[in-house]
Amino acid sequence: MADRKPLTARGEATWQRILDAATEEFARFGFAGARIERVTSAARTNKAQLYGYFGTKDELFDAVLAASFRQIVDLATIDANDLPGWAVRLYDEYLARPEIVRLATWSRLERSPQGHLVAEPERMDAEKLAAIAAAQEAGVVVPGDPFDVMAMVIAMSMAWSPVSNVYAAHADEDPAEHERRREFLREAVRRAVSPV
């Protein structure tokens, strides 16, 4: 989505309410099942404002997806010298914000069944890939395609996320259970990415 124009404080508040309501709507119902009427009602606005800020339903979904990806990048920053720690931070973010995983899953199911989940400009993985490549060059991370390393660590971090077909963890579980999973994940990723 193109950069948006600066808004007044009131306009910014409305824009954010729409984005928040759309995030909840798309995470719950997917793109096809989401209803603009429910978004505008939850955001306390109208369709004209929504479309004025975001354009089409497709563009609104793109904005929601991009915002959720920015959020996970900002909150679970990568340290390529500690990929096990990064995996644990991702696990924790999926617990705190399961809608991020649900949005990505809906996008995969309804919009991008193959290839990259989002187009090149929105991928936001250049920094992660460069960090992994530097760690590989330093001999800290197993050699290979940095994208494959990143994809594997992310997949491992999602083992108990809402996308799991085995078990989806939730924030209200016993903290000791989360700690057990974190330690298991940390060790599994360490073994997977450490050079022989």
Image (cartoon, grey):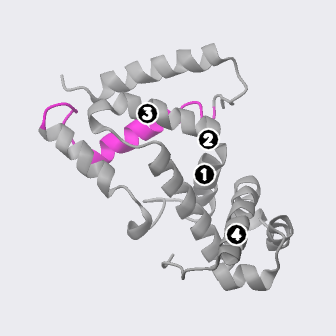
Q: Quadrant of residue 192?
A: top left
For marks 3 and 2, give the CA distance.
Answer: 16 Å
Residue 191 appears in view: yes
- The residue that mark 2 highlights is 163
Identity, as a three-letter code, of the amino acid under mark 1: Thr
Report the number of numbered marks. 4
Residue at 74 percent of width and 56 percent of height: 24
Left or right relative to 191: residue 40: right
- Residue 150, given in percent of the width and then of the height, sits at 35, 43
Q: Quadrant of residue 64?
A: bottom right
Q: Earlier in the sequence, mark 3 or mark 2?
A: 3
Q: Regarding mark 4 in the picture, which secondary structure is present there?
A: helix
Q: Regarding mark 1 in the picture, which secondary structure is present there?
A: helix
For marks 1 and 4, give the CA distance.
Answer: 28 Å
Q: Is residue 147 above or below residue 88?
A: below
Mark 1 or mark 4, whichever is nearer to me: 4
- The residue that mark 4 highlights is 13
Q: Earlier in the sequence, mark 4 or mark 2?
A: 4
Q: Quadrant of residue 179?
A: top right
Residue at 54 percent of width and 31 percent of height: 159
Q: Which mark is residue 105?
A: 1
- The residue that mark 3 highlights is 87
Q: Earlier in the sequence, mark 1 or mark 2?
A: 1
- Residue 36, given in percent of the width and then of the height, sits at 79, 73
Badge 1 vs badge 4, beta-carbon distance below 8 Å: no
Mark 3 or mark 2, whichever is nearer to me: 3
Identity, as a three-letter code, of the amino acid under mark 4: Ala
